[in-house]
Amino acid sequence: MKIKICENNADWSRFTEFYITNRRDIIPGYTVSSALLDVKHYIRHGRGAILMDWPDEMIGIGSFVLGLEERKFDRKDIAVLGNCYFVERHRSTRTFIRGLQVLAEQIDASSDGVEEVRIPALAGNRYTNKLYSKIADKIETRDTAYGTVHMYSTSFPAFAAYCGRFR
């Protein structure tokens, strides 16, 4: 597996195509316009990564933004993980934890002062909620156009330490 941080239009095009193609597996009913808005936020306020299997097959994406969308991204001390996704055969493998490790490295490199990491999860997705509850504490639940979402939060050092345990 190879992980490439999106650095140019070609990388972001591959990221966007994969995201749009798989958006309904990530969030049932998710619209193309919502996915495109997410990508715009990742480009302007964060980072994205594409995960590839050899030789160059797309198998997943990962992303984050710095700041809170509802506050126009002014809280750069908070990193919010974006919608991450892996093709079926790479789920329940080390691919997920390796992706989290790269996100932790990129969060650290992108800012001088990230103190908190937030991770949203659809309330109905038992797998991600169980996983994220091992990493962080649930701090809120909100209703969205796509269903109820739980928001998990942990300190950046705790997030990085969790990711580092699996090296």
Image (cartoon, rainbow, N blue to C red):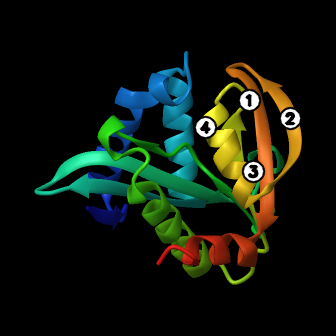
Q: Could you tell me if the residues under marks 2 and 1 are in contact, i.e. CB atoms within 8 Å?
A: yes
Residue 82 in percent (x, y) is at: 58, 48
Disc number for residue 127: 4
What secondary structure is marked by label 1? Answer: loop
Q: Nearer the viewer, residue 66 or 126?
A: 126
- Alpha-carbon distance for marks 2 and 3? 13 Å
What secondary structure is marked by label 3? Answer: helix
Q: Is residue 8 above or below residue 58?
A: below
Q: Nearer the viewer, residue 6 or 137?
A: 137
Which numbered disc, 2 or 3, marks the residue that appears first in the sequence? 3
- Alpha-carbon distance for marks 2 and 1? 8 Å
Amino acid under disc 2? Thr
- Name the residue located 52 percent from the left edge and 54 percent from the top edge: 63
Residue 9 in percent (x, y) is at: 31, 54
Q: Which residue is mark 2?
A: 141
In front: label 2 or label 3: 3
Confirm whether residue 99 shows in the render.
yes
Q: Which residue is mark 3?
A: 133
- Name the residue located 68 percent from the left edge and 69 percent from the top edge: 159
In front: label 4 or label 2: 4
What secondary structure is marked by label 4? Answer: helix
Q: Which residue is mark 1?
A: 123
Q: Is residue 93 above or below residue 17?
A: below
Amino acid under disc 1? Ala
Q: Is residue 98 above or below residue 121?
A: below
Q: Quadrant location of the N terminus?
A: bottom left
Which numbered disc, 4 or 3, marks the residue that appears first in the sequence? 4
Residue 78 in percent (x, y) is at: 76, 64
Name the outermost residue toward the bottom.
112
